[in-house]
Image: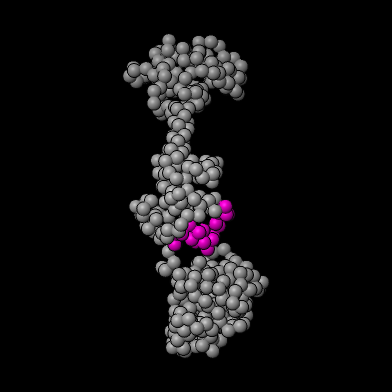
Amino acid sequence: MSRPGRADEGSLNAETLAFLTRPGLNRLWTAARARLERNGLRPTGTMRLQHLDAPEREALSLLLARPVTGTTAAISLSDLDARLHTSAAGRGLAATLEALGPPLTDRRALRDAATAERARVWSTARTELESTSLSSQPWTERWLEDLRRGGTLTRQDPYTAATVVTQAIRTLATLFPDGDAHPTPVSWGRGELATRATGSAHGLDDGTLLSRLVLRGIALAHDTEFPTDAPTRRALWRTASVTPDEVSSTVLTYGLRPTGGTWQETALCERADHHRETHLTLRELRTLTLRLPPGARVHVCENPRVVEAAADTARTAPLVCTSGSATTVVLTLLDVLAASGCTFAYHGDFDWPGIALANRITQRYGAEPWRMRAADYEYLASRAQVRDTPTILLTGPPAEAAWDPELAPTMTAVGIALHEEAALDLLLEDLG
């Protein structure tokens, strides 16, 4: 950027440099630099230096060619610029500061450029919007205004912001080709739609900026709330005839014997009769009528090893495994089972993440603790000590157990983590 007042002369001579860099002028140059950078590098306005000491008053008097006697001095930048031009420095204020270093930054020009770039982003977005069938829809104006006010795009660099908002508009135009929020359904896979918009099958994955922009548009088009969790996001995608990936994530089950007579339910019963585990996908859960006998008690575990051991020993109780965390597909299955009248008993790891997960399950479904009380922990810890089993220390912030106020203090006092496998023999007894 241009720097007004910059001279083309070479470096300052040693005598001039020694004078200008004396400690008594440090505050002057710092204040002048800050003011110049705010002023677009133009020497305008007045600075006020306060609490001047004797060396500062002496240096300023020599530089300004006028006596500075008080503890406060008002210094006109234009006068300082003129004085430097006629002094041994032989150059104006901006050029002198450049010579003293570091280079000046025209912050006003940077702000103006950033403002212009942001304006171009919105101009690009509006032009793109008007070129599509969405332009006649009132919700698109609100969508664009929400993006502007929300600041999500303005926090991106201009190229990214323009690219993403353009991709979002084209994606929404693909979903609503006639500008109608309820068009004749054309089914899209989310990966397929993402590839069309971005070239990547992951362009509309959860958490991406593009997916948030498109979902906000879909929500406004259907006059519904913006989704706040994975199940509601999936449901909103489906309202626009977009099918999220519903086959790659599964929930591990064992011993489920639904009472219906469809081929899917029959297959589950046969696998249970043959002591075979079953992985269910979200796609299957959407089409499966999964009703167990009234009041059926379903055990829920955290680690797949419990399911494996139950199958190996031909246990009969129904079992669902969270596989370390309760993902969307796990919660979807438990929701279905809870709606059919099932009750739950939960067991997981005796460590702080395990307690946090147990809290989530017990509070959401009213699940009973399954060998997960303080007495159970103490017994397993003592047994591990007697058996001389290597121990793992508890780490991380403690988590209170919602079902047993004594559990967290007991775990803190003993100080060891016990994974679910430590109780495997006891769990298998309960699984009948």
Q: Which residues are magenta?
A: 223-244
Tell me which colouring the rendered structure shows: one colour
Does residue 381 appear anywhere in the picture? no
Residue 369, given in percent of the width and then of the height, sits at 61, 77
Residue 1, given in percent of the width and then of the height, sits at 39, 26
Look at 41% across and 68% down and name the residue there: 248
- Let me know if residue 406 is in the magenta part: no
Look at 57% across and 22% down and name the residue there: 49
Q: Quadrant of residue 360?
A: bottom right
Look at 57% across and 14% down and name the residue there: 68
Q: Quadrant of the C terminus?
A: bottom right
Look at 51% across and 18% down and name the residue there: 44
Residue 126, given in percent of the width and then of the height, sits at 46, 38
Compare residues 338 and 175 and report the one nearer the observer: 175
- Count of numbered tags: 0
Q: Where 37 falls versus 280 (above or below)? A: above
Left or right, 397 with respect to 22, comes to right
- Let me know if residue 231 is in the magenta part: yes
Does residue 154 appear anywhere in the picture? yes
